[in-house]
Image (spheres, helix red, strand yellow):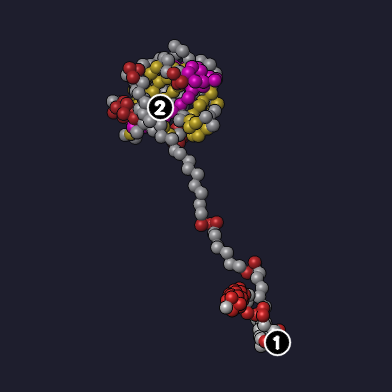
Amino acid sequence: MKYQGTVLGVIAMTFVVGVAVATSVPAASLAAPDSFDNVEIDAFAGSAQSFDAGDAAGASVSRDGYVVHTPTPTPTPKPVSSGSEGGYGGAQCQAGADAVAESVAFSPVYPDGNRMSDPFGPRAEGFHKGMDMLNSPGVPVHAIADGVVIAASGNGGTGGVYTSIAHKVGGQAVCSMYMHFQDGSLTVGVGSIVTAGQVIGLTGRTGNATTEHTHFEMYGADGVRYDPIPFMTEHGIAP
């Protein structure tokens, strides 16, 4: 009986080993070379494929469809009041023009001529709100039309010694301003009535000025400065 048990144990172990081998080794590895039918795979040649980068249609962008705008600001000078010395903004210009008769006579700032410098408009250090007329020290400066003085100062900061006169021209308020007179040369004050061609001061370089000249401005009831040349040309007094 002892021998029979040993035989049964060997048979059992052999069965277990056989099962393990059968489940771990692929069946194809145990097959003979001729036990499988030949398998043929046919590859059919298709049409030739190619790629040409030049044929690719990319996104079309039209440069003409875009516009770059560089803003150019238009300065609008604000009316300024010089306090007790009178005002030179639009409201004072209108009030002064309403108080005087229509001006029918006109005079150049310099009847004997002058040399032009900076005109009205943009320049490197900012917008130039008037025009500069160069002349020799002490040359008389003349009012361009009949009117009333609405501003006058003997120490006007950047404008130096200056004055502003209101006129009525064509029924409209027109104001003229003159800057950089010589110290002590101003001959008029706020409220003075002047006539076209009257001497109102002498050419100087007071205030923010590097040489003798008159900085001349024109504006109206809105207080906005404008190029004086068209007005002066129209009335025969262009420099």
Residue 15 visible from this viewpoint: no
**Front residue of 95 and 74:** 74
Place of residue 118 in the rendered image (x, y in percent of width and height, measured from the top left): 53, 29
Query: Separation of disc 2 and disc 1 at Cα?
Result: 120 Å
195 w.r.t. 23: above or below: above
Tell me which residue sits at (49%, 20%) in the image.
Answer: 208
Image quadrant holding the N terminus, namely bottom right
Q: Is residue 211 magenta?
A: yes
Choose between 65 and 106: the one closer to the eye: 65
Pick the residue in front: 50 or 61: 50
Which label was assigned to residue 50? none
Q: Residues within 10 Å of mark 1 (few under 14, many from 20)?
A: few
Q: Position of residue 16 (x, y in %)?
A: 58, 75
- Magenta residues (range): 201-221
Q: Which residue is depicted at the point 67% across and 87% down?
A: 35
Give me the residue at 34% from left, 30% from top. 90
Q: In the picture shown, does residue 80 fall above or below 43?
A: above
- Determine whether, in the image, residue 144 is placed left or right of residue 138: left
Q: Which residue is mark 2?
A: 176
In this view, the residue farthest toward the top is: 184
Give the secondary structure at mark 1: helix
Q: How many marks?
A: 2
Secondary structure under the numbered disc 2 in the rendered image = strand
The percent position of residue 238, horizontal first and vertical second, equals: 48, 31
The answer to whether 180 is drawn above or below residue 76 in the figure is above
Badge 2: residue crowd in 10 Å (few <14, some 14–19, many ≥20): many
- Provide residue 6's location: percent of width, then percent of height: 60, 75
Give the residue number, with chain letter if any, for mark 1: 34
Furthest residue toward right = 33
Q: Is residue 150 magenta?
A: no
Which marked residue is nearer to the observer: mark 2 or mark 1?
1
- Please name the residue shown 66% across and 75% down the image: 49
